[in-house]
Image: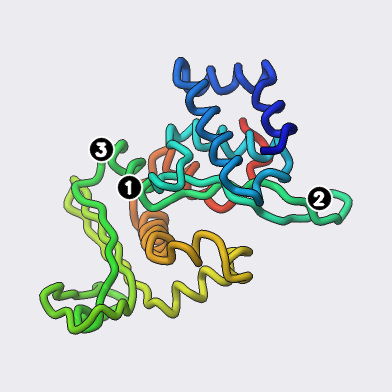
Amino acid sequence: MSNLIKNYFTQEAAQNKFKELLGNRASSFATSVLQVVASNKMLTNVEPQSVFNAACMAATLDLPINANLGFAYILPYKTKNEQGQYVDVAQFQMGYKGFIQLAQRSGQFKTISAAPIFKGQLISENPLTGFEFDFTKKESDEIIGYASYISLINGFEKTLYATVKELDSHGKKYSQTYKKDFGLWKDNFDAMALKTVLKALLSKYAPLSIDMQKAVIADQSVINRID
């Protein structure tokens, strides 16, 4: 792990910020973030403050940074600085389980879910009234798309569906690593596809709590200001 990042996290100001956000869980959270950095060689040379800011966003949303849990991630990202030079920074990214967690906390959802759709299960498609699926009609293990569904306590419900081709194009458009054939989209396309259809559905049709608004805005972003 880069000593610069480790030293940044041991500074009093950084430790105090984590304590402000997480209380007595601050130390264990900081340790988990440093473990994530140590396990990803591409994160070891990014700007330390960008790692700290991404970690603070996760802490603000009270989501753990652990790739195995799938709630939120810190990923390497290449961008231009004010001088027009390319630099390596850390990017905050939500996982689909993170969106589900925030939705559950709001108390407004009766059901929230996302699932792969196999060949034969898509019965009808209507851009106005929605999609109809029959999960007993699976013809093969070929996944043709992914769907997300929400129902609210007030009775509102909505489904969103996207094909594998549409999601593949989305990933290659917005993910630097996927364009180069590695990263989350490459290693776990299923999880990223589920996250994408769920985020799209929530951001378009769901009542968004303050934390959900933060998550939608911060997802796949380099966090420049922790306030």
Task: Assign a secondary structure to mark 1.
Answer: helix
Q: Residue furthest right?
A: 83
Residue beneath the point at 38% across and 44% down: 69
Residue beneath the point at 71% across and 37% down: 2
Q: Classify 10 Å Cα crowding around label 2: few (below 14), some (14-19), many (20 and above).
A: few
Give the left or right position of residue 116, taking residue 8 as reference: left
Task: Assign a secondary structure to mark 2.
Answer: loop
Task: Assign a secondary structure to mark 3.
Answer: loop
Give the left or right position of residue 39, taking residue 109 as reference: right
Q: CA distance from mark 3 to mark 2?
A: 41 Å
Check disc 3 and report the residue beneath it.
107
Q: Which mark is residue 223?
A: none
Q: Is residue 196 above or below residue 227?
A: below
Check disc 2 and report the residue beneath it.
81
- Residue 20, image x, y percentages: 53, 18
Check disc 1 and report the residue beneath it.
100
Q: Is residue 26 above or below residue 58?
A: above
Camera-nearest label, 1 or 3? 1
Would you identify the image quadrant in which residue 7 lies?
top right
Camera-nearest label, 3 or 2? 2
Give the left or right position of residue 12, taking residue 199 as reference: right
Q: Of marks 1 and 2, which one's residue comes earlier in the chain?
A: 2
